[in-house]
């Protein structure tokens, strides 16, 4: 990328790249509940995940922690450009500040929508099927389009020599103008990586789902007997044996009852594959596989 005005870019370049290049992917991770998973067991992930899934989740969890810095970079760039615009108004600089403010609006709107979508998907359970899947994919397409538009626009502006000349005529030093340029380009690169990673997540999520579906926990929950009536689910606390989100009710060997889908979410967060405990009485529920490969719930010893 051409940097015609400013000569000292390298001073900031490495520092800024080190801090700001990572990716705002936090809310996507939350959307498939990986955030809940990683916050519960930040060092050790559930046994049922394959090594490939674990590696990817660890990488994303790491990036999630530095996510906030990408936005912080945009804030610093906006503040500095705004200072130039206030003291030394130039048409291009003003337009540039306007674009930066637009980027803030996209980030705020996206955070809000993501938070809502992630909460809703969590409420419905983990699978991205049905309504949750539609929400998730709409969210993915909508923000990816906005961000790709922003990336293209930002790249065009970074190449405008006149803008950086106008900036350098203002009250800030050339080093500070260069910082603005570097922060904005780091932010744009962060968005590019964000879009790419989101599609990678899309490829990975069926794998995580498959890991869980073949786990013993999942098979145990599936093997628990269905019951026709239940006063209250011990997990979601809703009343009645059937619920829209929790599905049918099932009974654990300790004779506590809950919705099967609620228990699936509970079992998913359990780290050990051989057993999990009742959410109410903490009684350990274990199981064995018989000679024919059937999952049998082991009686409490
Ligand atoms: Zn429930
Ligand atoms: Zn129990």
Image (spheres, rainbow, N blue to C red):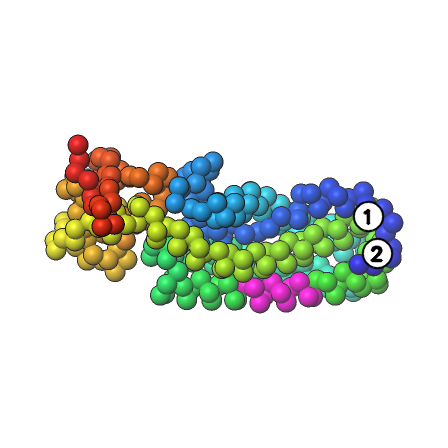
For the stretch drawn in magenta, the main secondary structure is helix
Q: Is 192 situated above or below 237?
A: below
Name the residue that disc number 2 marks: 3
Q: Is residue 111 visible?
A: yes
Locate residue 177, reporting x and y percent.
80, 50
Quadrant location of the N terminus in the rendered image: bottom right
Q: Is mark 1 within 8 Å of ligand 1?
A: no
Mark 1 crowdedness (10 Å alpha carbons): few <14, some 14-19, many ≥20: some
Magenta segment includes 151:
yes
Q: Does 248 sit left or right of 22 as displayed?
A: left
Locate residue 82, reporting x and y percent.
72, 53
Q: Residue at x 44, y 55 (%)?
A: 207
Q: Residue at x 44, y 37 (%)?
A: 44
Hey, which residue is sitting farthest left in the picture? 229
Name the residue that disc number 1 marks: 9
Q: Is 155 situated above or below 179?
A: below
Residue 251's disc number? none
The foreground one among 95 and 59 is 59
């Amino acid at each position: 990328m051409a940097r015609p005005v400013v000569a000292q870019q390298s001073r900031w370049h490495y520092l800024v790249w080190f801090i700001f290049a990572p990716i705002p992917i936090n809310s996507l991770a939350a959307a498939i509940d990986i955030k809940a998973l990683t916050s519960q067991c930040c060092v050790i992930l559930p046994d049922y995940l394959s090594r490939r899934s674990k590696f990817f989740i660890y990488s994303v969890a790491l990036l999630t922690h530095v996510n906030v810095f990408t936005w912080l970079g945009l804030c610093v760039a906006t503040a500095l450009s705004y200072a130039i615009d206030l003291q030394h108004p130039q048409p291009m600089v003003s337009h540039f500040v306007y674009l930066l403010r637009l980027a803030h609006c996209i980030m705020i709107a996206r955070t809000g929508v993501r938070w809502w979508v992630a909460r809703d998907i969590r409420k419905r359970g983990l699978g991205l099927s049905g309504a949750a899947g539609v929400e998730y994919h709409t969210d993915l397409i909508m923000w990816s389009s906005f961000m790709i538009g922003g990336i293209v626009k930002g790249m065009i502006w970074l190449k405008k020599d006149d803008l950086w000349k106008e900036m350098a005529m203002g009250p800030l030093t050339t080093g500070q103008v260069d910082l603005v340029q570097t922060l904005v380009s780091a932010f744009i690169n962060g968005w590019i990586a964000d879009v790419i990673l989101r599609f990678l997540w899309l490829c990975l999520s069926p794998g995580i789902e498959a890991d869980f579906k073949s786990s013993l926990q999942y098979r145990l929950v599936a093997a628990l007997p269905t019951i026709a009536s239940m006063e209250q689910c011990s997990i979601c606390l809703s009343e009645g044996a059937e619920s829209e989100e929790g599905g049918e009710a099932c009974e654990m060997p300790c004779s506590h009852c809950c919705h099967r889908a609620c228990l699936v979410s509970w079992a998913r967060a359990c780290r050990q594959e051989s057993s999990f405990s009742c959410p109410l009485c903490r009684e350990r529920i274990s199981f064995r596989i018989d000679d024919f490969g059937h999952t049998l719930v082991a009686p409490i010893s």
